[in-house]
Structure formats: structure tokens, C-alpha cells
């Protein structure tokens, strides 16, 4: 699961974080293997800007599930700081921490400038910083002057995240696992996954391509009920189109009726990989996604306004997955 730590209309950041912990504990009991937290800044409806702190909080409240960043937007941070933070997390929760890395800012241009100060990012910076982070988290080499402490030797697993061919190509060249952000930008999913697999170069004997595919999920007892619950996500996408960032809104019946064409197009594009429906439809569409992508894992993004209904949706997802061939 990938959690954006949505702040709900009428709720607080504290409420959002408490809901995330409750959700993580619930899906761990259901048998989910990972729980990742995103990084976004200057977005009133999301409380995931301090990603490493949230990773620590969720890891402390769970027992065995892997917890990680999905991801740290590396251009916003010095690699040494990331290595020290995740080295510390790995020391606190051995064998349970993942580090997903993205090259997008995770925010708007004004906030990007505030995060990076006067730094101007180039296309060459991300591969160089990924390599630096790999060195900092790897074994200390003779003569190495810059050592992450904690961090050195921790070998925290690094995943590259992407929504285009750039990170797919880089992940393949470095022999790293790859997660595609099809939960919001699915257009190049198949091309990126095919390129990654075809160009993969194993960094260690036995390494193989590993792919995670992001899937928005809204599940309920019936298709109609799920469609109503999904209107909260429809409202979020419409707000993005209009430049209005708001907390997650309560469901609205018939929300799509009469929406402007540009908003309907954005919702369709944003949620092209979304699975919205009752148990039978969820099962069919999960199978279709796995058949289409040959993904090693599906990473669900489940933003439902009512926290109880969110847990019920994840119950349905887990039940469906266990019943699939």
C-alpha cells in the first residue's frame, strides 16, 4: 500500500496520521507486504511532507511489514541526509525499511525553490545522486572520506520510482527494482516496464527485474457504492485541474454529471488504472492488471473519506487477492 496521508475535510493532520497508523496495522494483519509513504509539499490535503518521520511512526506501530518511502524526492534532499535518516531507520527497524527514490519535486515551483534554495536541477543530477546514495548506504570502501553514520553498510533496499522512461532506463542500468507511478500517471506504464525488463543488468548474481505497479483502489460491496465513494478522489482531481488544493472531500452523489470536459478528461487520465467496484469487478480488474503488466506486486492507493469504509475496501482487496489463481 502507498499512503498519501490524506487530511479529510473537518479533520486535522493528527487525525490523518492516526488513520494512517490504523490502516497500516490493519493491512499488516491482512498480509500486505509493504506500506510506503509519499513525499508531497505545500498541499493542504496531504500530511506526508516529513516522509522519514512518518516511516518511523508507522514502523514503530507495526511488527513485521516492510515500511518505506514511496518515495523520497531526491532533488529536494542532500544524499548524505537521506542516507543518515534511512540508515537510522534501518538500525531501529532491521530488515524492514525500503527507500524509494523519485526525481520529481513533489510540489509546485514556488515550494520547489523554497526547498532547493538557489539550486538548479539538471537531468544528470539524479543518476549521480542515486549512485552517491548507493555508495553511502553500501560498505565503506578503503580511503572513503564521506561516510554516512548511521547508514554506511546498512544496504537499505533502493527502489527507483517513475512515471516515464527515464527512471525505468536508470533502474535497469543499475540493476535496481522499479516502481511505476500508474496510480496517477499511467500513460507510459507498459512502455516503461517493457524497457526496464529488456535493458535490466543484474548488479549482483541472481538479481532479476522486479516491478511494482501503482493501482488506485475504491472497493465496496457493490459497484454503485464504490462509484459513490470514488467521488472523493474525483473531487481531488477536479481540484488539481482548477488549482484548488483542498482536504479530501466527502462523497457526492452524481459528482461527474455536468463536470466540464477538461475535468472529466483529467479524471479519466489520472485514474486510467483505477479499480473501482464490488468484489467481482475488483477481482477481474486485478487479474487484468497482472496479466497486462506481469507485475511482481500491486501497490494500492486507497483514498476513501470514511476511514472505516477504507478498511473495508482493503478487506475486499485482500480477500480477492487470496482467491486469485
Image (cartoon, helix red, strand yellow):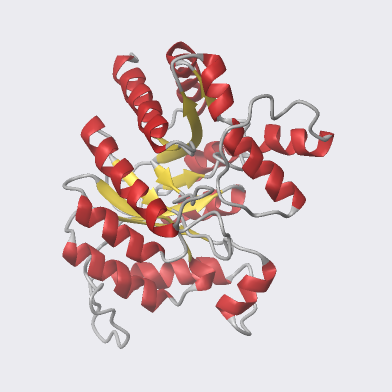
201 or 122: nearer the viewer: 122
Asked whether the viewer can see residue 314, the reply is: yes
Q: Is residue 308 above or below residue 92?
A: above
94 or 231: nearer the viewer: 231
Left or right: residue 246 compared with residue 59: right
Query: What residue sits 43% from the left and 58% below the top?
Result: 13
- Horizontal and vertical percent for residue 126? 53, 67
240 or 273: nearer the viewer: 240
Q: Quadrant of residue 108?
A: bottom right
- Horizontal and vertical percent for residue 222? 49, 14
- Residue farthest top in this picture: 280
Asked whether the viewer can see residue 175, the reply is: no
Q: Quadrant of residue 140?
A: bottom left
- Residue farthest right in this picture: 261
Query: What residue sits 51% from the left and 34% below the top?
Result: 216
Query: What residue sits 73% from the left and 39% below the top?
Result: 266
- Residue farthest front in this picture: 10
Q: Is residue 52 above or below residue 244?
A: below
The quarter of the image holding the C terminus is top left
Q: Is residue 219 above or below residue 129?
A: above
- Horizontal and vertical percent for residue 221? 44, 16
- Horizontal and vertical percent for residue 182? 56, 39
Left or right: residue 100 compared with residue 186: left
Amino acid at each position: 500500500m502507498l499512503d498519501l496521508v490524506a487530511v479529510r475535510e473537518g479533520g486535522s493532520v493528527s487525525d490523518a496520521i492516526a488513520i494512517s497508523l490504523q490502516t497500516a496495522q490493519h493491512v499488516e494483519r491482512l498480509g500486505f507486504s509493504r506500506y510506503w509513504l509519499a513525499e508531497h509539499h505545500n498541499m493542504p490535503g496531504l500530511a506526508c511532507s516529513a516522509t522519514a518521520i512518518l516511516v518511523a511512526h508507522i514502523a514503530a506501530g507495526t511488527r513485521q511489514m516492510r515500511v518505506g518511502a514511496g518515495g523520497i524526492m531526491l532533488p529536494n534532499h542532500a544524499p548524505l541526509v537521506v542516507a543518515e535518516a534511512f540508515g537510522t531507520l534501518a538500525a531501529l527497524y532491521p530488515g524492514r525499511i525500503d527507500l524509494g527514490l523519485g526525481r520529481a519535486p513533489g510540489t509546485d515551483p514556488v515550494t520547489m525553490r523554497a526547498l532547493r534554495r538557489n539550486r538548479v536541477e539538471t537531468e544528470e543530477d539524479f543518476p549521480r545522486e542515486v549512485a552517491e546514495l548507493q555508495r553511502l548506504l553500501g560498505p565503506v570502501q578503503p580511503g572513503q572520506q564521506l561516510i554516512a553514520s548511521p547508514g554506511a553498510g546498512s544496504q537499505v533496499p533502493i527502489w527507483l520510482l517513475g512515471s516515464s522512461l527515464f527512471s525505468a532506463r536508470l533502474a535497469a542500468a543499475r540493476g535496481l527494482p522499479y516502481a511505476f507511478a500508474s496510480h496517477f500517471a499511467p500513460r507510459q506504464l507498459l512502455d516503461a516496464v517493457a524497457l526496464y525488463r529488456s535493458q535490466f543488468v543484474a548488479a549482483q548474481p541472481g538479481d532479476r527485474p522486479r516491478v511494482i505497479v501503482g493501482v488506485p483502489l475504491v472497493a465496496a460491496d457493490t459497484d454503485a457504492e464504490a462509484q459513490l465513494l470514488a467521488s472523493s478522489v474525483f473531487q481531488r482531481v477536479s481540484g488539481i485541474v482548477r488549482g484548488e488544493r483542498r482536504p479530501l472531500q466527502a462523497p457526492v452523489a452524481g459528482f461527474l454529471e455536468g463536470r466540464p470536459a477538461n475535468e472529466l478528461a483529467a479524471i479519466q487520465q489520472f485514474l486510467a488504472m483505477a479499480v473501482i467496484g464490488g468484489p467481482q469487478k475488483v477481482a477481474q480488474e486485478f487479474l487484468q492488471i497482472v496479466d497486462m503488466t506481469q507485475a511482481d506486486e500491486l501497490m494500492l492507493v486507497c483514498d476513501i473519506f470514511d476511514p472505516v469504509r477504507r478498511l473495508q475496501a482493503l478487506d475486499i482487496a485482500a480477500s480477492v487477492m487470496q482467491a486469485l489463481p
